[in-house]
């Protein structure tokens, strides 16, 4: 009988402990952060020179209204920038598109790419992160030239935009985030100038798995996961540019191609006051 009483007492103790734990669990209402981005455009150019010009064809001075705005300010968020220049080879022969990007007068990237006759070429410059991330009063410049004949090469699109990275809704080891949803834009609504974005819906996501922080790559749509909100370098997502800042020219017969850019328009989440320990 004593053994049975001991077991009953033990079970009662567990139940009391569980009830106490549950009574401390607070579930908050869903929070929604809408993110507004501000594309900056340049003026089309009918020809480019055959040698590197002294004056940039594309130029932006960064202002505060170029940065994303948030309907609900996250605990912390970083910024990255990207530049796009869409060119067309209108001649009957292959041409070489040369480019250079400067930040505050210092070259931070250069290259060249062969563009077949009657093809489009898109410079994707994605290195505006880390030590080169855009800040107010930065001057960003793009220089373009064609070694053979600049009269055959037009600059049809110039675009610059700042995107969020390392988005962290809360910074509290004692909170668990769940039902975290990322709403991604599609090309037609976010980018009215007509880029095709084959990788625009790719990003790295911080996922809590087996008590370890792991990163997974996801594509498009709306996702819902459980996340631990503890401090990390990447928050709950980081833009692909921030992890793989390669710069290159994409060539296509009929389309301007934009890569590497994650276009998140909205983040939703619900949080509790208890971290996950399973």
Image (tube, rainbow, N blue to C red):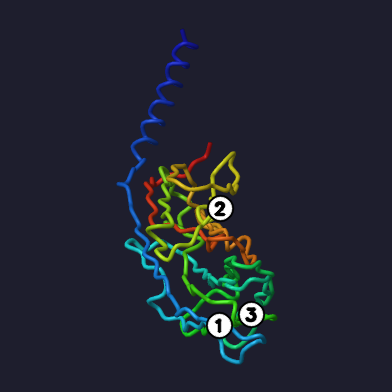
The CA distance from mark 1 to mark 3 is 17 Å
- Disc with the residue nearer the chain's start (2 vs 3): 3
Tell me what residue is drawn at x 46 percent, y 81 percent: 62
Report the number of discs. 3
Tell me what residue is drawn at x 46 percent, y 59 percent: 263
**Of the residues tagged 1 and 2, which is closer to the observer?**
1
Give the crowd class for mark 2: few <14, some 14-19, many >=20 residues within 10 Å: many
Give the crowd class for mark 1: few <14, some 14-19, many >=20 residues within 10 Å: some
**Of the residues tagged 2 and 3, which is closer to the observer?**
3
Q: Is residue 5 left or right of residue 95?
A: left
- Disc with the residue nearer the chain's start (1 vs 3): 1
Mark 2–mark 3 CB contact (< 8 Å): no
Which residue, given by chain and number where applicable, does mark 1 sit on? 47
Q: Position of residue 175 (x, y in %)?
A: 43, 49
Tell me what residue is drawn at x 52 percent, y 85 percent: 139
Q: Say what secondary structure mark 2 lies in.
A: strand
Give the crowd class for mark 3: few <14, some 14-19, many >=20 residues within 10 Å: some
Mark 1–mark 2 CB contact (< 8 Å): no
Which residue, given by chain and number where applicable, does mark 2 sit on? 204
Q: Say what secondary structure mark 1 lies in.
A: loop
Mark 1–mark 3 CB contact (< 8 Å): no
| Vertical relation: 252 (above or below) 24 | below
| Vertical relation: 48 (above or below) 249 | below
| Vertical relation: 111 (above or below) 239 | below
The CA distance from mark 2 to mark 3 is 28 Å
> Which labelled disc corresponds to residue 236?
none
Which residue, given by chain and number where applicable, does mark 3 sit on? 100
Q: Position of residue 114 (x, y in %)?
A: 69, 69
- Disc with the residue nearer the chain's start (1 vs 2): 1
Q: Position of residue 167 (x, y in %)?
A: 47, 59
The CA distance from mark 1 to mark 2 is 39 Å
């Amino acid at each position: 009988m004593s053994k049975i009483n001991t077991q009953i007492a033990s079970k009662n103790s567990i139940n009391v402990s569980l009830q106490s734990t549950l009574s401390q669990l607070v579930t908050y209402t869903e929070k929604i952060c809408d993110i507004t981005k501000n594309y900056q455009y340049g003026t089309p150019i009918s020809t480019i020179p055959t040698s590197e010009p002294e004056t940039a064809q594309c130029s932006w001075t960064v202002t505060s209204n170029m940065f994303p705005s948030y309907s609900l300010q996250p605990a912390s968020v970083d910024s990255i920038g990207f530049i796009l220049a869409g060119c067309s080879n209108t001649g009957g022969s292959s041409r070489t598109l040369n480019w250079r990007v400067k930040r505050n007068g210092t070259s931070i990237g250069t290259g060249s790419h062969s563009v077949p006759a009657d093809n489009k070429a898109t410079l994707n410059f994605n290195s505006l992160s880390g030590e080169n991330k855009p800040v107010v009063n930065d001057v960003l410049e793009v220089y373009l030239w064609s070694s053979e004949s600049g009269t055959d090469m037009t600059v049809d699109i110039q675009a610059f935009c700042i995107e969020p990275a390392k988005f962290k809704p809360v910074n509290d080891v004692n909170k668990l985030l769940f039902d975290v949803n990322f709403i991604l834009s599609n090309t037609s609504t976010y980018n009215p100038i007509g880029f095709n974005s084959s990788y625009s819906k790719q990003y790295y996501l911080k996922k809590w798995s087996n008590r370890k922080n792991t990163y997974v790559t996801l594509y498009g749509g709306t996702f819902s996961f459980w996340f631990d909100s503890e401090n990390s370098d990447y928050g709950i997502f980081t833009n692909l540019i921030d992890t793989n800042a390669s710069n290159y020219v994409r060539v296509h017969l009929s389309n301007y191609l934009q890569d590497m850019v994650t276009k998140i328009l909205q983040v939703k989440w619900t949080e509790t006051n208890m971290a996950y320990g399973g």
